[in-house]
Amino acid sequence: MLSYLHIRGLAIADDLEIELKPGFNVMTGETGAGKSIVVDAVGLLSGGRAYREMIRTGDERAVVEGVFTDVSKKALGYLENWDIPATDPIQIKRVIHRSTPSRAFINGELVPLNRLAEIGPKLVQIHSQNDQQLLLQPENHLEFLDDFAGNGEKLEKLSALTLRVMESKKTYRSLLLNEKEKNQEMDMLRFQIREIETVDLKPEELENLMERKSILKNAGRIKEALGEMEAIFHNEEQEGLVNVLGHLNDHLAKVAPLQSRFQPYLEPLNQAITMISELEQDISETGMEIQETGMSLDEIESRLVEIERLQRKYGESYPEIIKHLQECRTRLSDLEELEFRVKEQGDQLMAAHRDWWTAAIQLSETRKKAATRFTKTLKEELGGLAMPDVKLKFQFTMDPKPPLISDAILAFPHRETGLDHGELLISPNIGEELKPLTKVASGGEISRIMLAIKAISAGEEDSVTAVFDEVDAGIGGQAAVSLATKLRELSLSRQVLCVTHLGQVAAAASGHFSVSKTVVEGRTCTMVQFLSKEQRLQEIARMTGGREITETSLKHAAELIGGNNE
C-alpha cells in the first residue's frame, strides 16, 4: 500500500506530506482545489509521463516521493532482477527538472524511467474517468475480458508469434518481384558487375597513377634539376660533395677535442653527411625511374578516366567500389536463386501462420469460456451497485479462416489480440433487449459498470493500491450509496484512495483528507488535511447540503457516517 506521499513544487503544491491509511481513503474538496495534483503525483511514481509545465511557477524542479509498504513478491522480484535492494518498504522518487531530463529513483538507486512503468502496476493502479471512455470503445472490451480471465501469458505468446508472422510476411513480399522487374534488375546488376570487373581496379592504383602522371608531366624539369644536382655530387675537381664533407668532418674531429668551440658542430655535420648521402641515392633512383619504360602519359590519363567513371557511379575509394561490386554479386545471386528462396520462405510463412492460428484459437476458446463467468460475475457486482435488473452478454465475431495459399495468408490480418472481435451487450432495465453498451448506458451506469469491471479484474493483487479519480461522475441517490458500499468492500482486501464529490462515498471511508487552496505570500498553494471526526462531519455536511451548513445537513452527514459504521 502507499503509506507516505511527499510532493514538492508540482503545479500549485508547494510542499505537501500525506500519510495515507490502510483501507478506504477519500479526498474531497472544491473543484480546482488541487485533488488532481495528488493523483498526478501518484501517476508519476508509477511511470506516468512528466511535463515541464507541471513544475510550480518559479521553481526549477518538482519532486514526488512515495513509500510503498506490504508490497507483493512480484514487485520485490523486479528489484532483485534489477540488482536493486529488494526491501519492504519500497521507496520511489521522481524528479522533474525544468532544463534537464526527468529522473527516477527506486530505493535510492537511479533507474531508467521505464522501470517505473514496469513495477508501477504492481504497486498502484489508477482508475479515472478516462477508463470510462475506454469502456465506450468496443475495441477495448476484449482487454477487459482478458484481464478477468488472466490471459496475460497467452497474449504474450500470441504477440511473439504475431511478430514472427509479420517478419515472415515482409521477407516473403520482398522476394515476390514480378518477372519484368526481376529481369530488369538482373540486367542492371550484370552491367555494373561487368563494368567494374573490366576496369579491374587494384588497391592503391589510383594513388600510384597520379604520382606517375605527375612525374611524366614534369619529366623534363625533373631531369634537368637531377642533372644539376648530380653534377654537384660528382664534381671531379672537388672529389664529390660527400667526399669533401667527409674530409671536413675528419679535420673537425681532430680539432674539436683541442678547441671546445668546435665540439657542437660534430653531430650536426655527421647528420648532414648522412642526409646528403641519402639524397644522392634518391637522386640516382629517381633518374632511373624516369628512364624506365612503362605506361605513357596518354595511357595513364586514359586509365584515370576509367577509374574516375567508376568513382562517380560506385564510390570514391577502392574499398567502396569493391563493396558495391560484392553487393551486386550477392543481389544477383539472390535473384538467380529467387525461385528456390520464394518456395522456402513461403513454407516458413505457412509454418508461422499455423503456429499463430493454433495459439489464436486457444485464446479464443479461453475467452468464450471466460465470457460466461465474466458476465455472471459482473451482473452480481452491478446488483450491489443499484443495477439489480441488468442483463449482460459478451458478443463475439471472429475473422474467417483463410485458405492456405500465400496470397490469402499475406492479406490475412494477423493481430496481436487474435481472431476475436468482442463487444459487451447490456440491457439495464426489465423488458429491454440486449444492445451495445455504448448505445443504451447512461453516464452513471457507465461509471458503475467500469467500477464493477475493475473490482472483478483478475489482474489486480491485494497488495496493489487502487486509486479512483472521480469515477462517481453522473451517480447519485441510491446508486451513490451502493457505490460507496462497493468501494468500502474493495478496501477490505486492499488499500483504496478515492477522489470524490459524493458525500455518500466520503462517509464510507476510514480515512478522510480535505484538499483546499490558500494564498501564502501572494502565491496560491494547495493544502491537504487529514480530518478529525468533527471536521469530517462538517465536510460531508458541506458536500451533501451545499455551502450553508445547517443542523439538517449536519444530522444527515452524521446519519451517513453512522450508517457506514454499523
Image: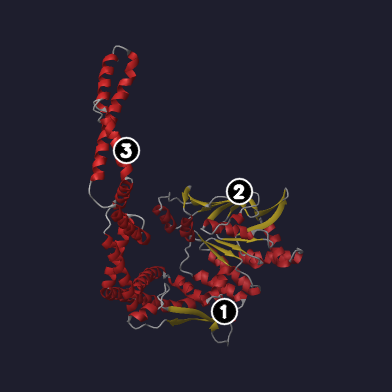
Asked whether the viewer can see residue 566, the reply is no
- Residue 75's x, y, as percent? 44, 57
Amino acid of disc 3:
Ala
Q: Earlier in the sequence, mark 1 or mark 3?
A: 3
**Which image quarter: residue 405?**
bottom left
* Foreground: disc 3 or disc 2: 3
Residue 253 % position (x, y): 27, 17
Residue displayed at 25% across by 25% down? 237
Tell me, yes or no, whether the two marked residues, 3 and 2, touch with CB atoms within 8 Å.
no
Look at the picture and state if 427 lies above or below 324. Answer: below
The colour scheme applied to this rendered structure is secondary structure
On the image, which quarter does residue 560 sit in?
bottom right
The residue beneath circle 2 is 60
Give the SS element for disc 2.
Answer: loop
| Amino acid type at image mark 2 | Glu
- CB under 8 Å between callouts 1 and 2? no
Disc sitting over residue 225 in the figure: 3
Q: CA distance from mark 1 to mark 2?
A: 45 Å
Q: Residues within 10 Å of mark 2 (few under 14, many from 20)?
A: some
Q: Report how many numbered discs are placed on residues in the image.
A: 3
| Residue at x 27% of width, y 52% of height | 296
Dot 1 amino acid type:
Thr
Asked whether residue 328 is in view, the answer is yes
